[in-house]
């Protein structure tokens, strides 16, 4: 670590997130201190982003390895007089100045030689990571607990290395990946509300839903006690489990809340019963104490919620300690009586779910839809299945327009007749390999060498007979006619496809598709969810048909250094769904389509009837209710509910909290952009006296942030309108050749891109 890692002024030292010594204070002053700390960190990042490029490079040089030949210096050393000052503002050396490390002595220009061609956006990302590293370092110095200090040190070294290598931080190791347990705490609490309070009147259910949301909010912002402070854990297994979960919480939830370079997860979403059971008693006591002290300070509407919180916590406590509680079941469903009761309540008294309870109404919405739709009886479905399984069955449309058979249909038929077989074979250095398997490997080597003439035979031999590689062989008449050579990286969660070929005389028979489907099933059974491969220009079309794409959805640090890279080839990726059986997928879809078409035919035969035309309009009637049209109800039309839009998951009809979170994420990234500096706060009238004479409706990012906190943006269009007003005002007041005008254009394009990424832009 360079000695400059500790060069922070007094203000910076106060910007680290709160330590875990105040574990019970999840609300009130503790939560305010936490949010204030995060706000100060963001403000400091904004100051760094606005520095001139020369000073930015100087800042980066302190965390960059010297580019001199065989030099081991890990960062530029500042002069002694600047080591306890705000170096971002006061220090700007010449590029020819020598480093003060006695083992280096290279110029500043040598330290930043590799940074000359990076963009402003990349530079700001690195500077943001540096601010995170400095805050982590201060947190590490202030943390008294040894275990917590080790976690901070690990994350500090990880981010430090990511800055040196200019890569994204990816946490690997024995901690695993979120979520860590199913069902999650959030899902279990949702189940608890439906299970315990689903029979109540809608207003009472909404009230308990608000209590549940408050509890989850507290849990997501709770500072848990370090394992060393938990004297109540006497069982060694409980101690071990809590220590693992506490470390996971630090790495994935607590630290990323103030360290933007790490991916942040909500505690209630990634943890389950094990953690909640370990901390519930302490959280329960602290929240009850908080209710007593805060009740009189709360507004009346919140005070009602606080009076119900103790009852909620006590009831939830029984379900947390109960090993057989249904709320922790992955297949939890409310009882039939509850579903009927909710249906009657929603249709009988005309009440509907309030906006505040939408987060917990997912299951209720599903049951509501079920009650509105007419379920088909088992007899109707059985008749449809019997009809389509009839050997003489063929719909009128299929006679005129024969359906296109799936690519692997013929191959599956041959497999069912035992004409072809699929086997996974590979070499081994630790145990004997069957003679038949070795002969198949030799045959596969011949197929790959003949079909891939651009590959050296020695290279094909090296991979096919490598014990780390396996090959899915397509066997016909006792000899291999095709195969896929692959290597699985279990720790990384992906499989690399190296060779894929079918002998030329057996192509265009669907063997390639059926081979890939067998490999997908083989991989999903072993928990692998991703395929990666380098495809040449002749193979890209084949891989696209198998579900591969050039859009790589796996982070580069996951596969970089593992997968073999080829010049002139294109990296392609395929994401697998663990619940699909790919060798049966086309047959299942085909069967479902036939069932639906047969059910439609049966329904048409039942309701087919010619009604007399309407004559009321000739008699002078201007309009009639749509439900009075003869035959409309008989065909299944219902006037009660409008179909909800599903194209945009975060639209106005969705959960307002989810919409606010999405808009908040966009607003945060817009504020961090390098072109956002003119719009961060309202225009100062003292600096620009005539501004408000020309601009009647001013807007800025600070005002938008306040509006977002006050829940003003109940629709995305309000949010988009305010953002558009910022850019319109700027272009109205400033001429096109100004820096302000260019910033408005740049930031507007960036804003539109971010809105499109989350599916909220439709212009």
Image (cartoon, helix red, strand yellow):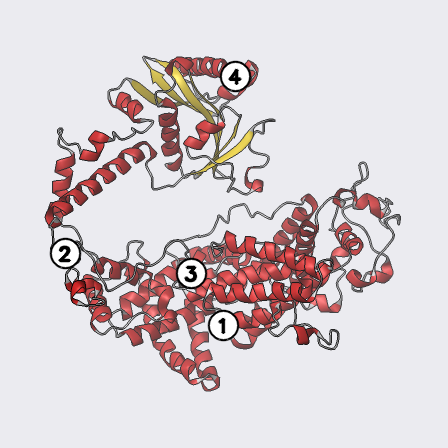
Q: CA distance from mark 3 to mark 1?
A: 15 Å
Which is nearer the N-term, disc 1 or disc 4? 4
Q: Is mark 2 in CB contact (under 8 Å) with mark 1?
A: no
State whether residue 372 appears in this view. Answer: yes
Circles 1, 4 touching at the beta carbon (< 8 Å): no
Say whether marks 3 and 4 touch (CB < 8 Å). Answer: no
Q: Which image quadrant for residue 632?
A: bottom left
Q: Marks 3 and 2: CB-CB under 8 Å? A: no
Q: Position of residue 644 (x, y in %)?
A: 33, 59
Compute the Cα span from label 3 to label 2: 40 Å
Which residue is identified by label 4? 461
Residue picked out by circle 1: 712
Can you say whether 516 is above or below 751 in the image? above
Say whether disc 3 or disc 4 marks the residue closer to the N-terminus: 4
Q: Earlier in the sequence, mark 2 or mark 4?
A: 4
Residue sitting at x 79%, y 43% = 113
Mark nearer the N terminus (2 vs 1): 2
Closer to the N terminus: mark 3 or mark 1? 3
Residue 279 in view: no
Question: From the viewer's perspective, is the residue at label 1 or at label 4 nearer?
Answer: 1
- Residue indicated by mark 3: 651
Residue position for label 2: 613
């Amino acid at each position: 670590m360079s000695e400059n890692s500790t060069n922070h002024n007094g203000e910076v030292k106060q910007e680290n997130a709160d330590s875990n010594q105040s574990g019970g204070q999840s609300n009130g002053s503790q939560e305010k201190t936490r949010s204030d700390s995060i706000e100060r960190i963001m403000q400091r990042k904004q100051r760094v982003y606005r520095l001139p490029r020369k000073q930015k490079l100087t800042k980066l040089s302190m965390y960059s390895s010297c580019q001199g030949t065989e030099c081991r210096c890990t960062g530029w050393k500042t002069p002694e007089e600047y080591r306890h000052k705000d170096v971002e503002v006061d220090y700007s050396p010449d590029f020819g100045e020598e480093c003060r490390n006695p083992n280096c002595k290279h110029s500043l220009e040598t330290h930043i030689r590799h940074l000359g061609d990076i963009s402003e956006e990349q530079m700001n990302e690195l500077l943001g990571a540096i601010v995170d590293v400095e805050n982590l370092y201060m947190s590490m110095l202030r943390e008294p607990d040894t275990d917590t200090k080790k976690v901070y040190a690990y994350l500090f070294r990880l981010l430090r290395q990511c800055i040196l290598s200019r890569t994204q931080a990816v946490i690997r190791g024995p901690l695993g990946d979120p979520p860590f347990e199913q069902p999650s705490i959030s899902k279990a609490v949702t189940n608890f509300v439906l299970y315990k309070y689903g029979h109540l009147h809608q207003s009472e259910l909404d009230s308990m839903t608000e209590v549940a949301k408050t509890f989850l909010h507290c849990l997501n912002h709770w500072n848990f006690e370090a394992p060393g402070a938990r004297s109540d854990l006497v069982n060694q297994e409980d101690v071990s489990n809590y220590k693992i979960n506490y470390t996971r919480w630090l790495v994935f939830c607590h630290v990323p809340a103030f360290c933007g370079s790490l991916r942040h997860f909500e505690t209630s979403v990634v943890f389950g019963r094990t953690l909640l059971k370990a901390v519930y008693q302490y959280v329960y006591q602290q929240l009850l104490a908080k209710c007593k002290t805060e009740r009189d300070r709360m507004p009346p509407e919140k005070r009602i919620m606080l009076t119900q919180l103790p009852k909620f916590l006590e009831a939830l406590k029984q379900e947390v300690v109960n090993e057989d509680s249904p709320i922790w079941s992955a297949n939890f469903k409310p009882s039939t009586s509850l579903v009927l009761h909710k249906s009657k309540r929603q249709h009988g008294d005309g009440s509907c779910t309030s906006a505040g309870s939408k987060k917990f109404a997912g299951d209720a919405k599903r049951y509501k839809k079920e009650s509105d739709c007419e379920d088909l009886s088992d007899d109707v479905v059985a008749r449809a299945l019997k009809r389509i399984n009839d050997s003489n069955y063929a719909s009128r449309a299929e006679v005129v327009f024969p359906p296109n058979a799936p690519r692997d249909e013929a191959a599956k038929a041959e497999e069912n007749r035992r004409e072809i077989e699929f086997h996974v074979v590979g070499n081994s250095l630790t145990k004997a390999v069957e003679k038949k398997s070795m002969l198949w490997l030799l045959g596969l080597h011949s197929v790959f060498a003949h079909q891939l003439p651009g590959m050296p035979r020695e290279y094909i031999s090296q991979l096919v007979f490598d014990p780390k590689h396996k090959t899915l062989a397509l066997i016909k008449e006792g000899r291999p006619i095709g195969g896929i050579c692959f290597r699985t990286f279990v720790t990384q969660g992906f499989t690399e496809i190296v060779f894929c070929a079918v002998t030329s005389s057996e192509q265009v028979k669907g063997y390639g598709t059926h081979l890939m489907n067998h490999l997908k099933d083989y991989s999903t059974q072993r928990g692998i969810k991703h395929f990666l491969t380098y495809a040449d220009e002749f193979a890209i079309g084949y891989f696209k048909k198998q579900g591969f794409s050039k859009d790589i959805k796996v982070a580069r640090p996951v596969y970089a250094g593992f997968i073999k890279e080829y010049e002139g080839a294109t990296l392609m990726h395929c994401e697998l769904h663990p619940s699909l059986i790919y060798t049966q997928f086309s047959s299942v879809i085909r069967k479902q389509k036939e069932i639906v078409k047969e059910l439609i035919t049966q329904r048409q035969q039942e309701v087919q009837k010619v009604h007399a035309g309407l004559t009321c309009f000739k008699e002078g009637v201007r309009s009639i209710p749509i439900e009075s049209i003869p035959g409309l109800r008989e065909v299944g039309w219902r006037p009660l509910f409008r179909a909800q839009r599903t194209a945009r998951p975060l639209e106005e009809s969705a959960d307002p909290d989810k919409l606010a979170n999405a808009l908040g994420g966009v607003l945060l990234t817009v504020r961090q952009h390098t072109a956002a500096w003119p719009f961060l706060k309202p225009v100062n009238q003292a600096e620009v006296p005539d501004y408000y004479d020309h601009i009647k409706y001013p807007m800025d990012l600070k005002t938008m942030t306040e509006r977002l906190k006050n829940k003003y943006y109940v629709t995305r269009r309000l949010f988009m309108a305010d953002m558009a007003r910022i850019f319109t005002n700027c272009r109205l007041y400033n001429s096109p050749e100004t820096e302000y005008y260019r910033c408005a254009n740049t930031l507007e394009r960036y804003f539109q891109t971010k809105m499109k990424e989350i599916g909220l832009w439709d212009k």
